[in-house]
Image (spheres, rainbow, N blue to C red):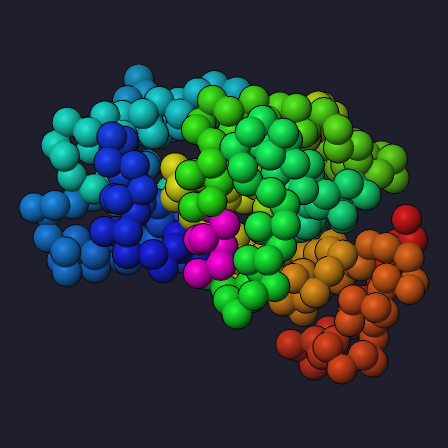
Amino acid sequence: MTSTSASPTAWATINPSKPTVIGLYGLPATGKSTVLEGLRNKLGETEFAFFDDSDVIYYLVPGGLKAFQKLEDPKKKRWRAEAITHIKNEAAASGKIAVVTRHFMFWSNKELQTFLVFDGDRTLSAEDGGHLLVDGLDQNGTGLKDSAMRDLFSGPMGYSDEAFHQATLLLEEKCDDDIFESRCDNASALVPLYPKFISLLRRVEEQKHIGVVVVTCGVGRLWTKILEHHGLSDSVKVIGGGRFSDGYFVTPGVKAAVVSHLRDVHDLNVWAFGDSPLDIPMLWEADQAVVVGDEKHYYGCGLGHGHSRWSPARATGPPPKYIVT
């Protein structure tokens, strides 16, 4: 699970006044370091600078990685932000494009047995936070309309890597970081979670053997703030893009890769929760697939058992369950 297929040159022209940082993201043992070394050998270090975020954290944190791993989540978050700033400063000072591996190492997997992987919009909530965010940006006078996003994904590119790259580019062009942060704050306050899922996630907080992550094709920062509003951000982590500074975006294939990695590499029992055809790839890969919506929605989206669009990748995969909302 790497960042995007866009060329470094294209990224560098987005905003020449800011350093360009390209992220190679992934779960542990997915080959990010190998990819980084391959890029180093192929691209050279005249125009590019290569970093592993673990090395940067080792350099910055007193006591190195061992001390970092003992910290509470809020302090870890601050040091990760410090590492990102350090890399940006290095890139700005050298004038080079930074390429960095970053790791989704949110949980200690020594005790984990089960993992819950949720889509965000229309799965954990009846609201579509992404629509609310874009509507808020339009009211702010940016000129970005929700219809522009819909037209983008309903066009020839569909839900391809190129389409998600273009959607991120639209957000970058229409609002700076301060406006983006403010609108995420506003939109997140308008997204209530389903009570049954709040109850479930609170119970999971008390269980050391269960991990939870939201993997969204939408805006990751927005979903982090939504979870913060409900007091769940410490126990429920988010994988999602929305800004080029994130270094990646999430496609349906990325969702599937997260689920299959948790299942195969970490030998976890994975439950995936989704609501739309975009979630089908990850539902295929899960040990247990759960569709959120009423029964009409369940079959109308092509998620019903026996429907031509539901064909589990693994022959032993059970038909999906559904939760009536």
Q: How many marks?
A: 0
Which percent across, then down, holds residue 55? 27, 35
Q: Residue 121: in sight, yes or no?
A: yes
Instruction: State the image quarter where residue 49 is shown.
Output: top left
Say whether residue 193 is left or right of residue 85: right
Which percent across, then down, holds residue 91? 20, 33
Is 261 drawn above or below residue 185 in the view shown?
below
Instruction: State the image quarter where residue 42 is shown.
Output: bottom left
- By secondary structure, the bulk of the magenta-drawn segment is best described as helix
Instruction: State the image quarter where residue 295 is shown.
Output: bottom right
User: Which residue is depicted at the point 28% across and 51% down?
Assistant: 10
- Dividing the image into 4 quarters, which one contains the N terminus? bottom left
Which percent across, then down, holds residue 316? 72, 77
Is 294 drawn above or below residue 188 in the view shown?
below
Which percent across, then down, holds residue 44? 10, 53
**In-front residue for pair 32/4:** 4
Is 124 drawn above or below residue 316 in the view shown?
above
**In-front residue for pair 130/232:** 130
Is residue 318 covered in magenta? no
Question: In the current view of this chain or complex, which residue is farthest to the left?
Answer: 46
Say whether residue 213 is left or right of residue 72: right
The magenta stretch is 162-168
User: Which residue is depicted at the point 30% across and 17% down?
Assistant: 62
Q: Residue 234: in sight, yes or no?
A: no
